[in-house]
């Protein structure tokens, strides 16, 4: 089962085919009320960071429905091993835990597979994977390459870590452009550390 | 929308409103032929388009799971991930920047050029590039393909700059169309 959970995506968008209206994403930063979940992941954004400037509060929290807080933290740590980004705060890796928790809530088989994978990580780390040394965590995760657990977590990373406004802000992706007059004048070719390709290869933008 | 009776056998029914179906429907209509275009997807508008890759994928693409096999990376890592193919009025032209490459001459003769491949039913095309060229020209003009009919090429983005630099270092050419000078 090495797939991005498109099924979730499809159902999320099932109502919008006719109207074309895409529902607003429920980002964890906006989440202030907690239901009776199985665990809550919490943290703070570094004061003065790009993201802190965008968020309504520097405190973030993500509620889990099936996995425990410790299990969520293990998944966050695993996500950081697979896709390590100093620029991304824990709040983004918490989205990975939240999305995997959502998959676990939707399928008992997935929940079992994730729990076993997490327990395996902890046992290989001699107790607590999230608190193990970085080089040890890397060796452990490398040893899992090719497993269903690894494939599921890695696959989920693609959208959970990179397709959110915090990641966009951290990496400098300016996001939706068309309502601001299009992307042409908004930095899509502002890379300066390589020589500009010749005009035959890449002509200047056509501005009418 | 015109109303056409079920027993009208002068009507051409086209399945799909993309680059192929949509273009054909337009040509036929201009010749006065009655056309019904069937489209599985919804009609979108500037008010409903989402300028966000993943949300747009949910809105525009066929979401049926892909079936794939073999050892290539996608089969290994994302075997069920649907391809980014549009299911919407206009088909994939709604998610298209205007670059469209003609087959090259040798690609019409894949069996002759590459030889038989065991287990595959490789064939040469029954037509040549020169036979198809006038129709390519017509379609390119109709669809506004970049680097044809005086339409400029696409400006490369930051990713392209990286690819261009890498290609150059390896003695290759890269362009936002085909190799320079090629059609």
Image: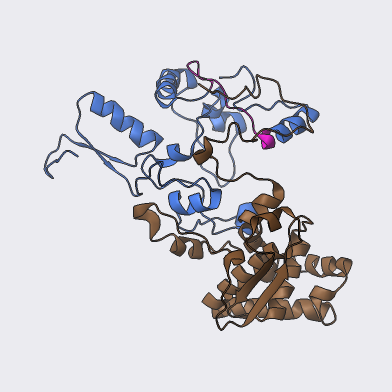
> Residue B174: which quarter of the image?
top right
Q: Position of residue A89 (x, y in %)?
A: 74, 61
In this view, B32 is above or below A165: above
Prevalent SS, magenta region = loop
Q: Residue at x 47, y 22 (%)?
A: B128
Query: Residue A162: within the magenta?
Result: no
Residue B117 shown left or right of residue B62 in the figure: right
Query: What span is in magenta?
Result: B147-160
Query: Residue B156: within the magenta?
Result: yes
Q: What letter labels the chain drawn in blue? A: B
Q: Residue at x 44, y 28 (%)?
A: B126
Q: Position of residue A144 (x, y in %)?
A: 75, 69
Chain A: drawing colour:
brown
Q: Position of residue A175 (x, y in %)?
A: 59, 46
In this view, B124 is above or below B141: below
Residue B116 shown left or right of residue B21 in the figure: right
> Residue B32: which quarter of the image?
top left
């Amino acid at each position: 089962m090495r797939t991005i959970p498109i099924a979730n995506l499809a159902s999320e968008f099932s109502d919008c085919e006719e109207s074309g209206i895409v529902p607003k994403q429920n980002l964890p930063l906006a989440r202030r009320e907690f239901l009776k979940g199985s665990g809550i992941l919490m943290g703070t954004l570094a004061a003065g960071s790009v993201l802190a400037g965008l968020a309504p509060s520097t405190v973030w929290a993500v509620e889990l429905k099936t996995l425990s807080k410790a299990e969520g933290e293990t998944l966050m740590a695993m996500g950081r091993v697979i896709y390590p980004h100093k620029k991304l705060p824990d709040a983004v890796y918490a989205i990975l835990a939240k999305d995997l928790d959502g998959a676990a809530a939707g399928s008992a088989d997935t929940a079992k597979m994730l729990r076993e994978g997490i327990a395996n990580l902890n046992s290989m780390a001699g107790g607590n994977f999230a608190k193990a040394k970085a080089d040890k965590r890397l060796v452990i995760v490398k040893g899992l390459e090719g497993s269903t657990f690894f494939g599921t977590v890695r696959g989920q990373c693609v959208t959970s870590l990179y397709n959110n406004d915090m990641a966009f802000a951290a990496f400098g992706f300016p996001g939706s452009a068309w309502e601001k007059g299009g992307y042409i004048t908004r930095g899509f070719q502002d890379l300066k550390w390589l020589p500009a390709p010749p005009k035959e290869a890449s002509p200047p933008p056509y501005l009418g | 929308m015109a109303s056409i009776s079920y027993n009208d056998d002068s009507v051409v029914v086209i399945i799909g409103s993309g680059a192929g179906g949509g273009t054909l429907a337009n040509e036929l209509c201009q010749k006065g032929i009655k056309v019904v275009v069937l489209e599985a997807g919804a009609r979108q508008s500037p008010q409903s388009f989402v300028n966000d890759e993943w949300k747009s994928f949910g809105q525009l693409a066929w979401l049926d799971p892909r079936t794939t096999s073999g050892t290539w990376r996608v089969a290994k890592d994302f075997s069920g991930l649907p391809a980014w193919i549009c299911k919407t009025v206009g088909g994939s032209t709604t998610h298209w920047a205007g670059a469209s490459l003609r087959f090259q001459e040798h690609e019409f003769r894949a069996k002759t050029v590459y030889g038989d491949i065991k287990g595959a039913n490789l064939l040469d095309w029954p037509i040549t590039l020169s036979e198809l060229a006038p129709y390519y020209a017509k379609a390119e003009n109709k669809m506004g393909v970049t680097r044809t009919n005086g339409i400029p090429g696409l400006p490369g983005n930051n990713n392209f700059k990286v690819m261009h630099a890498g290609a150059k270092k390896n003695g290759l050419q890269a362009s936002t169309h085909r190799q320079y000078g090629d059609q």
